[in-house]
Image (spheres, helix red, strand yellow):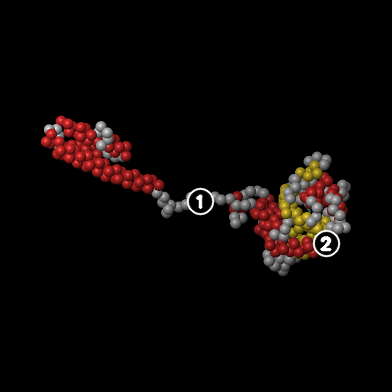
Amino acid sequence: MNMDEIKAVYLADLEVVEDAKQLADFWTKYLGKGGEVQKLMNGIKNVPKEEKKAYGQAVNEIKNWAQALYDEKKTELDKQAILARYEEEKVDVTLPVKTVAAGNLHPLTSMKNEMINVFAGMGFEIFEGPEIEDDDHNFTRLNVLKDHPSRDMQDTFWLTEDLLLRTHTSPGQIRVMDMEKPPIKVLVPGKVFRSDSDATHSPMFSQLEGLVVDKHITLCDLQGMLDQFVKAIFSDEAKTRLRPSYFPFTEPSVEVDVSCFKCGGKGCSLCKGTGWIEVLGGGIVNNKVLENCGIDSSKYSGLAFGIGIERIAMLKYGINHMGKLFENDIEFLKQFKA
Ligand code: DAH
């Protein structure tokens, strides 16, 4: 076989190489130890002496030529492999995006957070009491005595003779005053329960209780704080008005109105023509309640308030039925996406 014929065989073999594995086999077959080139080299011993030099050079040339062929093919295959990978990993940035449905906070949760934030800015801390309370904390120590008609203000779910689902967050006041000495400045958010259900009442709803106990606390402090509160929640122009009321745990007690943020006080359907909307109850903590918690009422005084979170949310968002806040109707809830 002359060298050209040998080259033709190599070329034909290389022609069918399609991938890295076949190329590696090609290399082993021709250029590897014991491969075809090596065999040609070994054949030198049978070549007459005067032709050995030419023969050696020819084999060497074949070897270099085969190596170059191999290198060229390898470069080509490597390039193909990279292109194939690019193709496979290609991202079409013009494709429409898959939308992921992100949830949002329930309006009551964001309302509660918003309210807490306002008071947190005034230095209030948070305490969360139990939803199952006893008579003592929910009523008696708050000066709502047994057989007193004021117990009828709240229709109670009784669990046993003594245990009940708390009817308000006010028992949190007692729990905090049992644990801490004045100065106290605390918020008690949470669920409360009453046997009551219509457009503006639900058997379960939530309140935000506030309690401040310190020296020289007066109704002015209460109104000042609540003024800031209604401005932050409703409108910069909002004002509060205190009306005398009655709660066993406060003396004096007040009902707090906010100036109508819809009509600015002129009178509209929201404020029923009065220019004012009732938003919460509060007052100066009854001395009996302070004493019930071992706080000297000759040294200290306190203010307290209780706000219905649903009521604030309904007023702020114009919701006319409290049930909407508990139905979990996704279309309704989506409107509150921030
Ligand atoms: N606990 C009262 C209720 O649920 C609301 C309330 C009124 C809380 C006056 C207070 C307060 O702290 O001082 O109707």
Question: Residue 107, can we see it?
Answer: yes
- The image shows residue 103 at horizontal and vertical percentages of 58, 50
Residue lying farthest to the front in this orientation: 49
What's the distance in space between the residues labelled 1 and 2, CA to CA?
A: 57 Å
- The image shows residue 227 at horizontal and vertical percentages of 74, 64
Quarter-of-image position of residue 214: bottom right
- The image shows residue 248 at horizontal and vertical percentages of 84, 54
Question: Residue 320, can we see it?
Answer: no
Quarter-of-image position of residue 213: bottom right
- The residue that label 1 is drawn on is 99
Locate residue 95 relative to residue 45 in the image: left or right: right
Q: Work out whether 30 lies above or below 208.
A: above
**3 or 183: which is nearer to us?**
3
Q: How crowded is mark 2: few (under 14 residues within 10 Å), some or many (20 or more)?
A: few
Q: Residues within 10 Å of mark 1 (few under 14, many from 20)?
A: few
Task: Name the quadrant of the N terminus.
Answer: top left
- The residue that label 2 is drawn on is 216
Q: Nearer the viewer, mark 1 or mark 2?
A: 2
Quarter-of-image position of residue 267: bottom right
Task: Look at label 2 and name its amino acid.
Answer: His
Task: Look at label 1 and name its amino acid.
Answer: Thr
Disc 1 Cβ-to-ligand 1 distance below 8 Å: no
Residue appearing at x 73%, y 66% in the figure: 239
In terms of secondary structure, where does tag 2 sit? loop
Numbered badge on residue 143: none
Residue lying farthest to the top in this orientation: 46
Locate residue 203 relative to residue 87 in the image: left or right: right
Name the N-terminal-most of marks 1 and 2: 1
In terms of secondary structure, where does tag 1 sit? loop
**197 or 261: which is nearer to us?**
261
Residue appearing at x 67%, y 49% in the figure: 326
